Image (cartoon, helix red, strand yellow):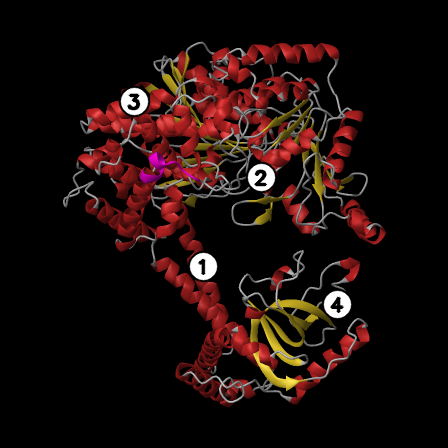
């Protein structure tokens, strides 16, 4: 085992703790070098901490070993990282184990459970998802007898010694000071890297902050680049040592191939020694060029990113068919084919109709398992198309796995996959989370995914997580990853994706009303919101970054001093003039470019300046004006602004040389001195024109020959030298006849500022270096100002202000009184963490629920459950439309109050995100007794998503019932109980196959 060399002591932000790095053990170094399975061990230790462990049994803090009787033995030899982790556990100290998916972190978790059993203590195992909790419960029940399960919708053996639960349940226990915790010695946090989840990450952070110091923690994580920082936070928070055991070791090495869509053959880009093969990458790029020259029609539109039409007859589909067939022929199965869309997953699987991977015996076993599994459903549900259609697919050894599947089918697929009866699994990335279900080969059908904001390349962290499924320990000598790409990729983009460092764990801490109210209602006083903020990982990371910011400022100040200090005021003044002119011109152009004003002047030959965001594309020449955007989306992405009044100006613009080779679109680029570019006609939205010149030049009738276009480039360049101060612009008042008084004033302001600019000594200075130096100086000073602001503007203060504002909201809504004492309404909100606690208590207290029957209550409550959106138009029956209207009105009022209290809340967005009517009809009919087959016809939302939402809704209704009970509303309590009861039947609440 390789250990990190001594780096000396590193201080933590607070002066009460330090990190000890482990010294290399010289005597055994030669033995260790023979071990390729290296791991790094570090320990974060509080200052002044002395260990009283017997060194002959436990080693030292910096070199833990364990020579005692093991609490559990394994049928295999433990890897170095597992040995070191076990030694840390036996020292009764917290440990973070950071390793790849298939490396064997579970062995460490099981050891801590065995220790707790041995020492007659209890242990809690938390996981991020209910589905993972169910799987973990099954796995641990086979290993240990005394195991219980607590998720929002299932509770089994709650008094067991080992409890598996979701992190939300643990946080709830900590808030309510549950008795169970007094007997717990260890808490295992599985998949701790989930802490960076935007929505739920804060739940992990709060749970870790609230855990009593006597309880030790085991954190299991995928590889992360700042594991030491996390351990330092734990050490700082709980004033106890925290070890980090980190390994990059993969028991089965991986080979990464690229398959160009529409091409043929695989290219090995990274071999099993993690060497990037540039020679193969070049061949891969060539194959794209050949493809484009050879068969224009075969190349796939980059927008489709390898998507296939239904039935899978497009080239993307046949390519996937080719790959799967080849994998089977080469005996590379089982294979997981990852797609980033659930519909795509299903379409790919359906396009495999000609393939069959199972023998007659295997088919029989699949059928038997399938029949047994669906026995837990009632008769009518067994005949659902989603179930019936699956059997012929599964019998051929093909399956689909995504969050929209019926839970029973999803679990059935997992079980069959583990048994080797599914050879080709089409899955979304959620399959890469959690339980160890490896395959020999992993295929990526695309390298870009939609993340809610944009289509982006998948990050190295995501790639590591998914590719980690390739290669089964003890079965394969290597795992194979095949990446399908449909357009040329930069070499570094691909290299960073495949060989990039794992992402760091970054805190997503935020303050919720649920947390604030719970903290206010706890009388002990040690847990205040202030305590949570200052102890959060967020604040720890922020304070740790401060010394670095300080260093950066002094470095920049040094650079500023080195730059020519003369005329600093001049630089600032010149810089400001340019900024002011740009702002006024922007304002003026938005008026000038209104079609009724500008079209008359956009004649062929007119010189216009084009600007997109921060990029100035320089002067171009108008060729033609068209009324509407061209069909087929032929606009270069850079110039396809969504504004523009439906007019397109075909403009000759300077483009980068060779940008239209291979039939691709021209790429406009700002002209640089000495650079040879070409003129091309580019469709430009009207709103992107930033200036009109007085000048017009004549255009040759045929612009197809390059010479014709280059002659115009020369003419434009010549005008540039003739007018060194800039081309004369059309005066909107004198030349265009716009006479609005405000506009005249605007034009005069610009003229005045331009005269100042032209008279400025810097404008006349032709010394490029001097100007560049001035520019840099201005940039450096600006950056220094920003960094200093960041240092002053303490994160803590930001959160304190937010806390103050949120408390004002709670006072206005009557959750707390003027002294911050929690009132009746607040006591109800304390019990609700599944939906928006402010809004739902508002409805409880303003009588909205009182006027509804329990079916309407269930339907209205479904609006609070986050889930898939429906794309269909929603028409609600009257008995649902009125309650929805009341919900929206209350949401608007709450959003406005939050806005008044200086919280950043977009009122419309808040209403939209808290009132989601997509499942109201479905839940209403289900509650009234409709069959599942009937309700799935009512929406285009996936069956599995409906069931997941219904189960969360049941959990939510139970929280509402508890809240009504806490405030003595017996009628409401009964109504919520009846609503919950009306949901709990049939396939919606069928037992998990794991339980």
The circle drawn on residue 551 is: 1
SS label for mark 2: helix
747 left or right of 40? left
Q: Nearer the viewer, mark 1 or mark 4?
A: 4
Does residue 450 appear anywhere in the picture? Answer: yes
Q: Nearer the viewer, mark 2 or mark 4?
A: 4
Does residue 220 appear anywhere in the picture? Answer: no
Residue 537 screen position, x and y as percent: 39, 42
Residue 562 screen position, x and y as percent: 51, 73
Q: What residue do we see at 83% from left, 54% from top?
A: 293
595 left or right of 631? left
Q: What residue do we see at 65% from left, 23% from top?
A: 473
Q: Nearer the viewer, mark 4 or mark 3?
A: 3
In this figure, which residue is indicated by the disc labeled 2?
Answer: 462
Q: Residues within 10 Å of mark 1 (few under 14, many from 20)?
A: few
**Cα distance between the residues tagged 2 and 1:** 32 Å
**Cα distance between the residues tagged 4 and 3:** 70 Å
**Cα distance between the residues tagged 2 and 4:** 36 Å
SS label for mark 4: loop
Range shown magenta: 875-882
In this figure, which residue is indicated by the disc labeled 4?
Answer: 657
Disc 4 vs disc 3: Cβ atoms closer than 8 Å?
no
């Amino acid at each position: 085992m390789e250990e990190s060399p001594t780096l000396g002591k590193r201080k933590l932000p607070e002066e009460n703790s330090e990190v000890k790095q482990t010294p290399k053990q010289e005597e055994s170094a030669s033995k260790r070098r023979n071990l390729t399975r290296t791991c790094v061990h570090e320990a974060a230790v509080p200052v002044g901490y002395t260990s009283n462990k017997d060194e002959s049994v436990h080693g030292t803090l910096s070199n833990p070993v364990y020579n005692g009787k093991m609490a559990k033995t394994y049928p295999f030899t433990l890897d170095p990282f597992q040995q070191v982790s076990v030694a840390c556990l036996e020292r009764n100290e917290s440990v973070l184990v950071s390793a790849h998916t298939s490396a064997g972190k579970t062995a460490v978790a099981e050891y801590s459970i065995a220790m707790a059993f041995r020492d007659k203590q209890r242990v809690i195992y938390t996981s991020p998802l209910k589905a993972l909790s169910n799987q973990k419960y099954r796995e641990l029940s086979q290993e240990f007898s005394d195991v219980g399960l607590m998720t929002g919708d299932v509770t089994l053996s709650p008094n067991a010694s080992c409890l598996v639960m979701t992190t939300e349940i643990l946080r709830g226990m900590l808030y309510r000071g549950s008795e169970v915790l007094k007997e717990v010695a260890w808490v295992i946090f599985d998949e701790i890297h989930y802490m960076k989840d935007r929505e739920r990450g804060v739940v992990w952070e709060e749970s870790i902050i609230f855990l009593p110091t006597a309880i030790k923690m085991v954190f299991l994580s995928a590889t992360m680049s700042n594991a030491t920082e996390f351990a330092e936070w734990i050490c700082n928070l709980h004033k106890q040592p925290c070890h980090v055991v980190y390994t990059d070791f993969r028991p089965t090495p991986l080979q990464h191939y690229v398959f160009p869509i529409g091409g043929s053959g695989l290219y090995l880009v990274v071999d099993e020694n993690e060497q990037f093969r540039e020679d193969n990458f070049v061949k891969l790029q060539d194959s794209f060029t050949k493809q484009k020259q050879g068969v224009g029609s075969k190349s796939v539109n980059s927008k489709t990113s390898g998507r296939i039409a239904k039935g899978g007859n497009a080239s993307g589909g046949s390519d996937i068919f080719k790959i799967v067939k080849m994998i089977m022929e080469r005996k590379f199965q089982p294979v997981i084919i990852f797609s980033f869309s659930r519909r795509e997953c299903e379409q790919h699987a359906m396009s495999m109709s000609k393939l069959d991977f199972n023998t007659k015996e295997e088919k029989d076993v699949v059928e038997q398992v399938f029949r047994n599994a669906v026995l837990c459903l009632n008769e009518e549900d067994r005949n659902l198309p989603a179930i019936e259609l699956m059997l012929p697919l599964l019998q051929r050894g093909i399956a689909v796995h995504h969050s929209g599947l019926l839970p029973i089918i999803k679990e059935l697929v997992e079980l069959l996959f583990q048994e080797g009866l599914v050879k080709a699994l089409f899955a979304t990335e959620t399959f890469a989370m959690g339980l160890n279900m490896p395959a020999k080969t992993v295929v990526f059908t695309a390298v870009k995914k939609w993340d809610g904001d944009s289509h982006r390349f998948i990050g190295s962290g995501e790639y590591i997580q998914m590719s980690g499924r390739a290669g089964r320990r003890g079965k394969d000598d290597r795992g194979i990853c095949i990446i399908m790409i449909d357009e040329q990729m930069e070499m570094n983009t691909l290299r960073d994706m495949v060989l990039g460092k794992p992402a760091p764990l970054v805190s997503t801490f935020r303050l919720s009303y649920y947390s604030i109210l719970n903290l206010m209602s706890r009388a002990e006083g040690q847990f205040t919101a202030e305590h949570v903020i200052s102890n959060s990982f967020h604040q720890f990371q922020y304070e740790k970054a401060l010394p670095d910011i300080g260093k950066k400022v002094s470095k920049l100040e040094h650079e500023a001093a080195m730059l020519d200090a003369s005329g600093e005021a001049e630089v600032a003044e010149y810089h400001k003039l340019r900024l002011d002119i740009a702002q006024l011109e922007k304002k003026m152009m938005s008026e000038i470019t209104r079609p009724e004003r500008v079209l008359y002047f956009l004649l062929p030959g007119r010189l216009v300046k084009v600007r997109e965001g921060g990029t100035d594309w320089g002067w171009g020449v108008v060729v033609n004006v068209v009324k509407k955007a061209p069909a087929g989306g032929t606009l270069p992405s850079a110039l396809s602004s969504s504004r523009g009044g439906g007019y397109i100006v075909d403009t000759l613009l300077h483009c980068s040389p060779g940008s239209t080779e291979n039939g691709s679109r021209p790429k406009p680029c700002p002209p640089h001195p000495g650079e040879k570019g070409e003129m091309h006609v580019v469709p430009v939205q009207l709103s992107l024109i930033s200036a009109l010149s007085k000048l017009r030049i004549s255009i040759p009738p045929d612009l197809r020959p390059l010479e014709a276009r280059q002659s115009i480039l020369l003419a434009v360049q010549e005008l540039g030298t003739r007018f060194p101060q800039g081309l004369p612009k059309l005066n909107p008042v004198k030349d265009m006849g716009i006479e609005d008084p405000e506009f005249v004033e605007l034009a005069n302001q610009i003229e005045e500022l331009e005269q100042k600019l032209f008279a400025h000594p810097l404008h006349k200075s032709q010394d490029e270096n001097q100007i560049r130096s001035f520019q840099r100086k201005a940039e450096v000073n600006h950056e220094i100002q920003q960094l200093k602001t960041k240092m002053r503007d303490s994160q803590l203060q930001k959160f304190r202000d937010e806390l103050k504002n949120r408390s004002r909201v709670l006072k206005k809504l009557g959750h707390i009184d003027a002294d911050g004492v929690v009132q009746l309404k607040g006591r109800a909100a304390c019990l609700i963490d599944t939906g928006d606690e402010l809004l739902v208590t508002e409805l409880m207290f303003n009588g909205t629920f009182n006027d509804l029957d329990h079916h309407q209550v269930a339907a209205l409550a479904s609006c609070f459950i986050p889930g898939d959106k429906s794309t269909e138009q929603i028409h609600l029956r009257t008995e649902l439309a009125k309650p929805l209207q009341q919900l929206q009105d209350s949401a608007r009022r709450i959003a406005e109050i939050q806005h008044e209290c200086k919280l950043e809340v977009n009122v419309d967005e808040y209403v939209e995100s808290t009132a989601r009517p997509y499942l109201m009809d479905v839940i209403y009919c289900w509650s009234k007794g409709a069959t599942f087959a009937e309700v799935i016809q009512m929406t285009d939302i996936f069956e599995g998503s409906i069931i997941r939402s219904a189960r969360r809704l049941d959990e939510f209704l139970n929280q509402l019932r508890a809240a009504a009970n806490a405030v003595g509303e017996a009628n409401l309590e009964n109504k919520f109980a009846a609503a919950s009861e009306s949901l709990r039947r049939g396939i919606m609440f069928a037992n998990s196959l794991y339980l």
